[in-house]
Image (cartoon, grey):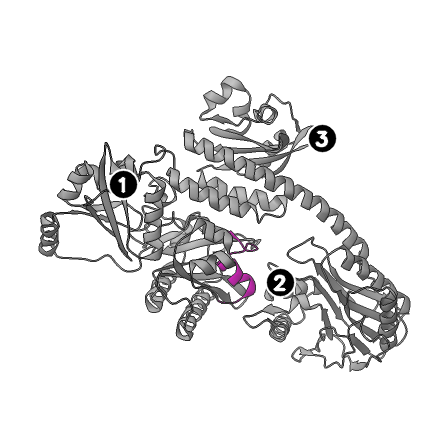
Amino acid sequence: MSGGEGPAGADAGTGADARPAAGAGAAGRAAGSWLLDEALTATIRRTGASAGGFHLWDGPERGLLALVVLCGVPAEVAWPWHRIPVAASTPVSDAVREDRLVWIGSQEDLAHDYPQAAVSLPYEFCLAAAPLRGRRGAHGALFLLWPAGHARTASARERHHVTSAARRIARMLDEAGGTPEVPDRPRVIPVAPPRTYGSRPAQAAADWAERLPEGAVALDLEGRITFVNGTAADLLGRTSGRLLGTWPWQSLPWLDAPLVEDRYRSAVLSREPVEFTALRPPDIPLRFQLYPDSSGISVRVTRPARHVETVRSGPPAGGSVPYTGRIHQLLHLAAAMTETVTVRDVVELVAHQVLPAFGADALVLSAADAGRLKITGYHGYDPATIERLDGLPLGTGLTPAGQVLADGVPAFFGDPAAMSRAHPGASRISGKQAWAFLPLTISGRPVGCCILSYERPHDFTADERAVLTSLAGLIAQALDRARLHDAVHDLAHGLQQALLPHTLPTVPGLRAAARYLPAGHGMDIGGDFYDVIPLDSTTVAAVIGDVQGHNVAAAALMGQVRTAIRAAAGAPPGAVLARTGRLLAGLDTELLVSCLYVHIDLASRCATLASAGHPPPLVHAPGTRPRRVDLDPCPLLGIGADTPCPVTRLELAPGTLLTLYTDGLVEKPTVAGVDAERGTDDLAAVLAENDGADLDDLIEALLHGTGAASVHADDIALLLLRL
C-alpha cells in the first residue's frame, strides 16, 4: 500500500514525534522550529483542514521551493511536491510568484488549472496555498488540504483564517532572522498528539476487537500496520507478529497491486471511506474497507458474500519504492518534463526529482556534440571528475557511456566489481559504488547520456530498470528541446545586448546605474530599453521605454526607437517624443511604445520630463520621503502622432535620486488583475530604507525588495540617476 523503504519509509522516525531529538539535523535544531510546527498544527485545526505544510526557499538563488514541514499525510504521498521550481505551474509556486491566495476547490479545478499536479494526485480534495510574505519578500508558501466533500468555494472566513495564518508564520520567520536551513526531507508531524488510554481501557478495547466476527486492522498515516486482531490475522494468513510494524505490500505480496495503492492514497488525501476486494492466494477473495481520519486508517477485512471483481497482484515488490509508487513517479516526472525549457531546467529536474525518486546520489547529463560527449550538467560530483569526463569521444571505452549511446541499450552496474569487469578504470574515476547508464536517443538518433550513480552498491530491480529506461526517453526529448531553446536564446540574447548600451557614459556631476532583466518566460528578449545621452558639458538626457512584446520583433523595434531618440536628443523633451512618434507611425508597425524622456540641466539642477504613457519616475531628495513625480502623459508612441506632449519641470537638490523604471518592476498580479500602485509603493519603501546607498547596491536592494530578482513575468529596465 505504501513503500516502506521509499519516501514514506525514510520518514518513519519523524511521524511519531515532531520534537527534534539530540543529534538531529540543523533544521530540526533551528530556533523556532517548534513554534513553526505548532503554528501549522494550530492552523490545520482552526481551519478544519485535514493536512498541510509549508515550503521555503531552497538555497540562495531562490529557484526552488522545498517542503520543510508536512502534517496529516505521509511524505511518500506528497513526494511530487518535495521540491518545486518557483517558475513551475503549481498552486504553491503560483502563490509565491503572484503573491496571492490560490484556492483549488475540486479535482476538476486541479485538472483544469494544474494538469501536471492532477496527473500525480488524481484524488478528490480541496487545496489552498498562501504566500508567507515577510518584511523582505516571500519566505515561501503555506498549503492546506481539506477532505472530499468540502465546499468547492472558500468562504470569506476560511480565506481570512488561511491568510492570517500565513502572515503569522511569515512574522515568525522574520523574527527568526529569515528562512531557516532547509532539510533534505520534510519533518512529518502529527495533527494532534496520539490518543492515550489507561492500561485497563486499552485492554478492554483489544478484547472487544478480538470478539468481532470480522477482521480489524489499524494503519498509521504512513501505511504501517499498528494493530491486527485474531480474525484479521486468520483471514490474511499471517500471524500478528509477522504483520505488526510492516507495510501490507511488504508482508502480504499479493496486495502489491496498482488498485490497492490507489485506494490507499485516495483514503489518505480525500479522508473518505474506500474499499476494494483482493484475491488471497490461491483463490480466496477478501474485502477491505478503509476508514481514514487524521490519526490513521481503520480497515475492515471480511469475506464478500458474493463474487466480485478482485485485485490481482502486480510485479513483485522490491527496490526502494513499490511498483505502484513508481507508476505515480513516472506520471509525475513525465508531466514535469513537459514544463522544462532550458538545459538547466532539465538538469535541475533530474537532480531534484529523479535522484530522490530512485535513491541515487549523483548524476551526469551529457549531450552528443560534434562526435563528443559534452557535459551539460551534473550534481553530486566534484569539478575535477567532471573535467576528466567532459569531451570524451562518443566511442570512448573509458566509461560505458560511449557503448551505451552507440547500442542504445542501458547498462546497470550494481557494484564496482561489476563495473571493473567491463571497464577497469571507470570505477576509479569518481569513487561511486553503483551506476545506471541511460542512453538518450530520439528515433534512433543519439542525443546524449544520463548517468545516475550511488554512494553504496545498489541492486537494480526489474521494475526499476523498466521505469528508468522509460524515463530516459522522456529526458532525451526534454534535453533535445532544451538545447534548441538555448541556442535560440543565445542568439536572441546577443541581439538584445547589441541593442542596449554596453556601458553608461561618465558625466561630471551625475552618477548613473542601470539594469535590464528579460521576462521570466519566452525567449528572454523584449522591448524594454534605457539610455543616457550626454548633450554638452552641463546637460544630459536620460530615457527609458517599453516596446510591447517579448520577441525579436519587439527587440528590433526597440533598437529603432532608441536610435530615433538619440537622433532627436537635445530638442525639447516634448518635441523628442513627438518626432519619435511620427517615425514610429511611418514604420507601419502594430506595436506600441511607452517612453519617458528626461532632460537634466546639471548647472541649474533642473530636470524637464515628458512621458508617453510611461510609469512616473520616483524622486528622492535628501531628507525627504521618495515620491512619484506627478506627470501629465501624452498617448503611447504609435497613437496620435500629432498629439502635443506636455512637459513637467523639477528642481533637483544636490544628492537627489531619480528612479526610472518599466512597468515589469512594479506590476503585481492580484485576484482582480494587476496593481501597479502597490508595486510603486513597495519600490518607494525600499528606496527609503536604503537612503544614500551605492547605486549598484541600491539596484540589488530594489530588485530583491520588490521580488523581481527571483520572479518576474515581464521585462524589467531600471535606471538610477543621482546628482
* Amino acid bearing label 2: Ala
As drawn, 628 above or below 463: below
Q: Nearer the viewer, mark 3 or mark 2?
A: 3
Residue 216, percent from left and from top:
18, 48
Q: Which of pointers 1 and 3 lies earlier in the amino acid sequence?
A: 1
Label 1, label 2: how far apart the Cα atoms are: 54 Å
Residue in view at x 83 percent, y 74 percent: 599
Find out whether residue 98 is within the magenta segment. yes
As drawn, 171 above or below 631: above
Residue 552 or residue 274, whichever sits in front: 274
What crowding class fits label 1: few (fewer than 14 Cα within 10 Å), some (14-19), or many (20 or more)? many
Residue 73 lies left or right of residue 219; in this view the side is right
Q: Which mark is residue 370?
A: 3
Label 1, label 3: how far apart the Cα atoms are: 55 Å
Label 3, label 2: how far apart the Cα atoms are: 39 Å
Residue 609 or residue 491, whichever sits in front: 491
Q: Which residues are magenta?
A: 84-101
SS label for mark 1 = strand
Q: Nearer the viewer, mark 1 or mark 2?
A: 1
Residue in view at x 63 percent, y 46 percent: 342
What crowding class fits label 3: few (fewer than 14 Cα within 10 Å), some (14-19), or many (20 or more)? few
Instruction: Quickly name the residue at label 2.
Output: 708
Instruction: Quickly name the residue at label 1.
Output: 278
Placement of the N terminus among the 4 image quadrants: top left
Residue 348 lies left or right of residue 456; in this view the side is right
Q: Nearer the viewer, mark 1 or mark 3?
A: 1
Find out whether residue 562 is within the magenta segment. no
